[in-house]
Every structure is written in C-alpha cells, then in structure tokens.
Amino acid sequence: MSHYPHPEPDDPHQDPRPASDTPFTHPPSGGYPNAKMAPYSGLEAQTGGWQAPPGYQPASAGGQPLTTIGDIAVYQHEVVTPAGRFPIKGSAWTVTDMSHVHESIPAYAVVLAVLLFVFCLLGLLFLLIKERRIQGYVQVAVHGNGVFHSTMIPVHSPQTLPYVMQQVNYARTLSAAA
C-alpha cells in the first residue's frame, strides 16, 4: 500500500497532467526565453549550462580589475558581479566570517601516550598536543544602485579572513573616493 492517496476525480488539487509511467518525458519549463541549452560538442569548450543568445557581447569594463573578491570584480569606477554592474560610488560592502576552528588531539599523540604510559607517566604529556583546523566560508556581499550580490570564499587558513578584509577595505576606499 502506498502512503500517497489516490486523488478523487473531482479533487481540485490533483495534477492536471495525465499520469504516465515515465514522469520525465517533457523538459522542465522556465529559464531564459532568449537563450538556449546547447548539447556538448567537442568543438567548443563550455563552462556552464547557460548559452549566450546569438549576437551577445558582454560590456567591457575597461582595463584590468583593481581587485577581485570571489566572483566580484572591482574597477576604478564600477563593480562587476554576475548579478549586474553598477557604479562603485555609494556601494555598500558587508563581510561575514562563517569560519570555525576545530581543535582536537591527533591520533598519533593518543597512540604515543598509551604506549609510553606503560614505561613512565610522562607519556601522558602527549595528550597535551592539539591540532587546529580551520574550516568554513567568508561571505562578502555588495549592493549598490539596486543590485545585490553575495559570494562565499572558502577558508583554508587563518590568513584568509585578513586577506579578504584587506580587499574589501580597499573596495570601500575606492567607493568613498569616487
């Protein structure tokens, strides 16, 4: 017996599509009306599922970015994100540290403590060895001129947060000077 009830013919919440044995016969609806999904061909490299419409030319920001924070590019007078581009003047930057530190006793220290405990009590000093690992993300959000974008930067070392903060402070300085 299935735990899903069979709808009655006059049920207003039943699926209007006819039931079939193969539920995935139609492609999903939605997406960009002027873009298409192209099958993979060995002739051209693809980086994602979205294909630009014919004649699409991305606007040039002019020159090299002064800094990049994740997928956010900061130029002298504008910020370019996947969500859109906007002037750097008046942009607001937010940084959220979502990293955490794991501290644990490594396995070799436990083994050495057990082995050397038999000979002398000094083997217990190996239990004082701690191993620190930092994991998580730093979230950087920017908004300005009606556009909002957020990016997550993985943290693998304690130096990641100060480095990201330095980049964001540089972008804030450019925003204030513009």
Image (cartoon, rainbow, N blue to C red):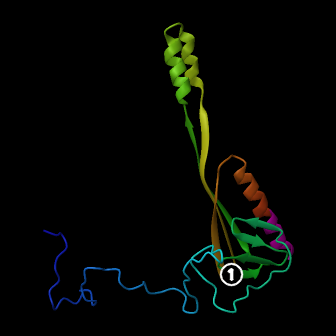
Q: Is residue 48 found left or right of 61 in the rendered image?
A: left
Q: Residue furthest left?
A: 1
The answer to if 40 sits in the magenta stretch is no
**Residue placed most toward the observer, 34 or 3:** 34
Q: How many marks do you count on the picture?
A: 1
**Residue type indicated by callout 1:** Gly
**Residue placed most toward the observer, 2 or 98:** 2
Identified at 59% across, 77% down, the residue is: 41
Q: Quadrant of residue 174?
A: bottom right
Q: Is residue 140 found left or right of 74 in the rendered image?
A: left
Q: Quadrant of the C terminus?
A: bottom right
- Which residue is tagged 1? 84
Q: Where residue 173 appears, x then y in whole percent?
A: 83, 67
Q: Where residue 77 appears, x then y in whole percent?
A: 83, 78
Q: Where residue 118 appears, x then y in whole percent?
A: 49, 9
Identified at 79% across, 78% down, the residue is: 78
Region in magenta: 170-178
**Residue placed most toward the observer, 138 or 61:** 61
The answer to if 177 sits in the magenta stretch is yes
Q: Quadrant of residue 32?
A: bottom right
Q: Residue furthest top?
A: 119
